[in-house]
Amino acid sequence: MDDKFLALADTVKEGDIDKGVAEVEKLLAGGVKPVALFTECIEPTLNILGQQFSVLEIFLPELMIAADVVNAIQEVVEPILRESGEANISKGTAVIATVYGDLHDIGKNMVSLMMQVNGFKVYDMGVDVSPQALLAKSEEVDADLLCLSGLMMPSMPFMRETIELAKANPKLADMKIMVGGGPVTDQWASDNNADGYADDAMGAVKKGIELVA
Amino acid sequence: MNHRIRLFDVIERSLSGEVMSERDFDMKKIAIETQKMVKKYDINFKGDNFLMHDQGFLNRVWDAGIELLATTGVYSKDTGRVISYTEAEIRDLIKLAPKEAIYGADGDAVLEVSRTPDDTRLVTNMGGSVSVPMPNEYFVPCMMSYIQEPLVEMHCPTTNMEISNGMEIRTKSPLEIIAAWEEVKLFRYASSILGREGMAHHGIGISVSDIGQLATSFMMKKTDSHCIGIISELKVDNTILNKIAQTVMLDAQANPYANPIYGGLGGGVNGQLVLMTAEMIACSIIFLGTTVGTTPTHPNLFISTNKELMQITSIVFAAISTNSNIMTRLTQTMAGGPVTKTLLYEVIASTIAATKSGVSRLQGPRSATGAVTGACSGLEARLQGEVIRAAVGLTQEKAEEIIQKAYSMYVDDLKTQPYGKPFWEAYDVHSIKPSDEWQKMYEDVKNEAISWGLPL
Ligand code: B12
C-alpha cells in the first residue's frame, strides 16, 4: 500500500470515524481520486481485517468499528462520485435478515458486516423478519441480492416461502437469493430454488460477488 | 424475596430503564465495557491448563462480572430500554440464590446442589442432545436411549422435525402448539414405559417462540426444568419474559441460560470470562433461575470442547462456585458424533473439567455440534454420568493430567468434525441397544481412560 494511505488504513483499524473522515478529506484535497481511496486503501485493509477475523486474530467488535468508519467515509465520498460520474464503488445492494421466528443473529451479523466491509450496500433488517417484510424491503431498495439466515428447523418453512414469493414477483426478477445457517446446505439451497449458499461469512462474500456480477 | 415480587420489579425496570438503541448497547455497553473490566481487574489469562487454582484470579473474575452487569444491565429489545441493577442490589440478590433444588419426582427425583470445585457431591447428569433435529419416527426411540440409562437423571429432548401426522413444524403457528404438546406427551410416554415417569423434563425444546411453552405449561410439573434462552449478549425480549412470567406464576423452576459466542462481542478468552460470569449472574438475579446455564460456542467450530472454551468455562464455574451458591449448568457441545472415539474423548475431557470446577449440572453431550440431523445417542450420556462419578474424587492435579490426555486424543479432529453415524445406525432402534461397533468403541475408550487413572 502506498505510504500516503497508511494513516487512513490506521483509522479504519482503530475505528476512529472523525480521523478517518478528516484523512479522506485531506487525501481528496491532495488530488487522490475517490475510487482510489477504496481500491488502493480501504478494500485491502478490510480484506486483511476479514482474514484476521476469520481465524479469530481479531474479534467482532474490531470488525464493527471498522465498518462504522467505512460507512462514514462512504457517505462523504458517494456524493462526489455521483457528481464526477466515476465508477460506482458499491458491489451491489443487499438485503439481509434472519428469517421469521428465528432470533439467532450472530452468524447473520457476521455475514452482514463482512458484506459491508467488502463493498456491498447492506440493509440489515435484523431478526424474525416475515417473508412479506423482506420482499417489501427488497422492492423498496431495488436489491440485487437477498441474504437469508436460518438456524432452526421450525423456521425453515419461512425461508422456503420467502424464496417462493420472491421468485413469483416480477419486480424482483433480477434479484438473486443467497441462503445460509445451520440447517441449510448446498442441497437444501438447490432443492428450494435459492441461487446460492455459503457456509461461512467469507464464503458468503465470495458467493455474493459471484451472484451479482 | 418472593419471585413474583422480583418479577414485577424486572418488568417495571424494563419499562422505565434508560432508552438506548440495540446497536449502542452491543457496542458501547457490551463490547467496550467488557474490555474496560478486563483491564480494571487485570484479567490476563495465559497458559495451557484447563483447571484454575489461583483464587485471587477467580475472585477478580467474579468481581469484574458483577461490575460489568452493574454497568451494562440487560437490554430489552421490545421496550428499547435497559433493565439496570446497581452493584449493591446485584450483590444482595446473589445471596438469594438457592443452594439446592429437587428436579423430578418420586423415585426419579434428583437433588441438585450448589457445588465447589472439590465437592465430592455429584453433578446432575441431564443426558440429552438437546434440540438436535430428529426425524419423527426416531424421536421416541432416541429419547428412550437416554431415559433407559440409569445414570441419566433428567432429559432434554431433541427437536422433533414433524408432528405425528407428518406435518413440518412451524414456529409461531398452531403447529408449534401441537408440537409442544407432543413433546411433553411423548416424553411422559417414553419415561413411563421405562418406569421412570417421575423424571424431570427440560423443555419445552420445540417452543421456539413463547406460545408452545405457554400452551403446555399446565402439563409441565413444578419439578420440571423450564428452559428459557436469553439472547446473547445480555438481551431479552417479551417472548422470553413471557416464559419467565409463566414459570414464576406456576411456582416452577426457571432454568434460564445464555449462549456467549467466543470471538463475538465479548472478544477472546479474557473478555469471555467476564461476560460469561455477568450473564450467569443475570440469569440468577434478573431471570430468576433456580439453576443457570451457559452454552458457549466457538464461531467457526460450533462446539465448546476446544481449549479456550473449556478454559473459560472451568474458570467461570470455579469463580461462581467459590464466591456464591449459584447453581450452574453447562451444555457441552462436541465435534464428534455417535460411533466416533472423538465424541467419547471429548465427553471425558469436558465432563472432568466442569465437574472439577464446581458445576452443578451437565447437559448433553450435544453431539456433532448439535446441528446435524439425527447425530446423537444415549450411550454418550451414559459415559457422561460415569465420568462425573469417577471425577469427583480426583485431585485437581490428576484431573488436569487426564483432561490433557483426553484432549490430546481429539484436538486434531476438531476441524474435521467426524459426525459419525446417525442414531438409527448407531443403535438398533427396536431393542434400543447400541450397535456392536459403538458398544466396543465405548468400552475401548473407557478402558483407555481407566489406564490413565480415571476410576470408571
Ligand atoms: C447462540 C445460540 C442461541 C442464542 C442466540 C443468540 C443470538 N444473539 O444469536 C439463544 C440463546 C438466544 C438461542 C436460543 C434458541 N436456540 Co439456539 N443456538 C445457538 C448456538 C449455540 C450457536 C449459534 C451461533 O451463533 N453460532 C455461531 C455463528 C457464527 O454461526 P452461524 O450462526 O451458523 O453462522 C455462520 C454460518 O452458518 C454462515 N451463515 C449464517 N447465516 C448466513 C446467511 C447467509 C446468507 C449465508 C450465505 C451464510 C450464513 O455464516 C456464519 C458465520 O460463519 C446454536 C448451536 C450451534 N452449534 O450452532 C444453537 C441452535 C441454533 N439453537 C437451537 C435452538 C433449538 C434454540 C431454541 C429454540 C432453544 C429453546 N428451546 O429455547 C431458542 C430459540 C430462540 C429463537 N426464537 O430463535 C438449535 C436449533 C435446532 C434446529 N436445527 O432446529 C441449535 C442448533 C442448538 C441445539 N441443538 O439446541 N440459541
Image: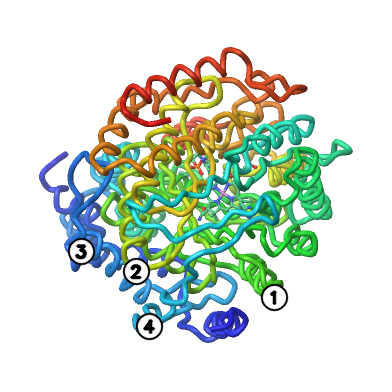
Residues at marks 2 and 3, CA–CA distance in whole angstroms: 19 Å
Q: Nearer the viewer, mark 3 or mark 1?
A: 1
Nearer to me, B338 or A163? B338
Left-right relation of B132 to B455: right
**Badge 1 or badge 2: first in the primary sequence:** 2
Q: Verify CB contact (< 8 Å) between mark 4 and mark 1.
A: no
Share a chain, discs 3 and 1? no
- Determine whether label 3 and label 4 are within 8 Å by CB: no
Residue indicated by mark 1:
B249
Mark 3 and mark 4, same subunit? Answer: no
In the image, farthest residue toward the left: A3
The percent position of residue A203, horizontal first and vertical second, equals 45, 32
Q: In this orientation, does residue A74 appear? A: no
Q: Amino acid at mark 4?
A: Thr
What type is the residue that disc 3 sits on? Answer: Lys
Disc 4 and disc 1: Cα gap in Å? Answer: 26 Å
Q: Nearer the viewer, mark 1 or mark 2?
A: 1
**Chain for disc number 1:** B
Residue designated by label 2? B28
Whether residues under marks 3 and 1 lie with C-beta atoms below 8 angstroms apart, the answer is no
Above or below, B164 against B69 in this view is above
Chain at numbered mark 4: B
User: Which residue, given by chain and number where applicable, does mark 3 sit on?
Assistant: A19
Mark 3 CB near ligand 1 (8 Å cut)? no
Inter-mark Cα distance, 2 to 4: 18 Å
- Residue type, label 2: Lys
